[in-house]
Amino acid sequence: PTVYFVDADGGQHEAEVDVGTNVMEAATENFIDGIVGECGGVLSCATCHVYVDKEWLSKLPDASEQEEDMLDMAIEPEDNSRLSCQIEMTEALDGLVVHLPKRQF
Ligand code: FES
């Protein structure tokens, strides 16, 4: 499946992602600037914060309580904020669009 990363300046980057890989890993493997993933995906950093495109938001499983708590630590969270390490790719998410925040710190 393909994920589209849209940076804060509107630049779009496309990445082929294996099913079962999370979006934070996909971003770092593809050298996408704007997703840091400092903790390696264990919900203790919030530097993998993304804004999920509104059209895709309802297609994702709900955030866990732990993710919600950690999202409070993200910079400028919005209603469509998610931690990308908690978004695991499936075929159903082919074409997923996530927007990158201006900064993670
Ligand atoms: Fe740290 Fe996602 S990589 S919370």
Image: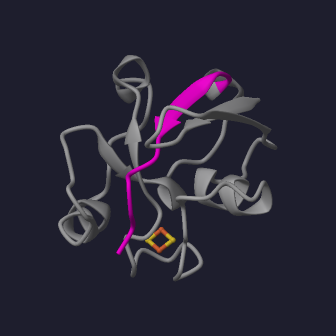
Instruction: Considering the whole magenta stretch, tell me its main secondary structure.
Output: loop
Query: Looking at the picture, how far across and down is residue 16, in whole percent?
Result: 82, 37
Which residue occupies 50% across, 77% down? 42
Above or below, 71 relative to 60? below
Magenta segment includes 98: yes
Quarter of the rendering containing residue 74: bottom left
Foreground of the two, 43 or 74: 74
In the image: residue 72, left or right of residue 98: left
Which residue occupies 43% across, 23% down? 56
Foreground of the two, 68 or 74: 74
Write the start and end of the magenta stretch as one range: 94-105
In the image: residue 46, left or right of residue 12: left
Quarter of the image containing the N terminus? top right
Query: Looking at the picture, how far across and down is residue 90, in whole percent?
Result: 67, 34
Which residue occupies 26% across, 63% down? 71
Query: Looking at the picture, how far across and down is residue 24, in whole percent?
Result: 60, 59
Query: Looking at the picture, how far across and down is residue 13, in whole percent?
Result: 69, 36
Above or below, 51 relative to 27? above
Quarter of the image containing the C terminus? bottom left
Foreground of the two, 7 or 74: 7
Which residue occupies 59% across, 78% down? 40
Above or below, 9 relative to 102? above
Above or below, 11 relative to 87? above
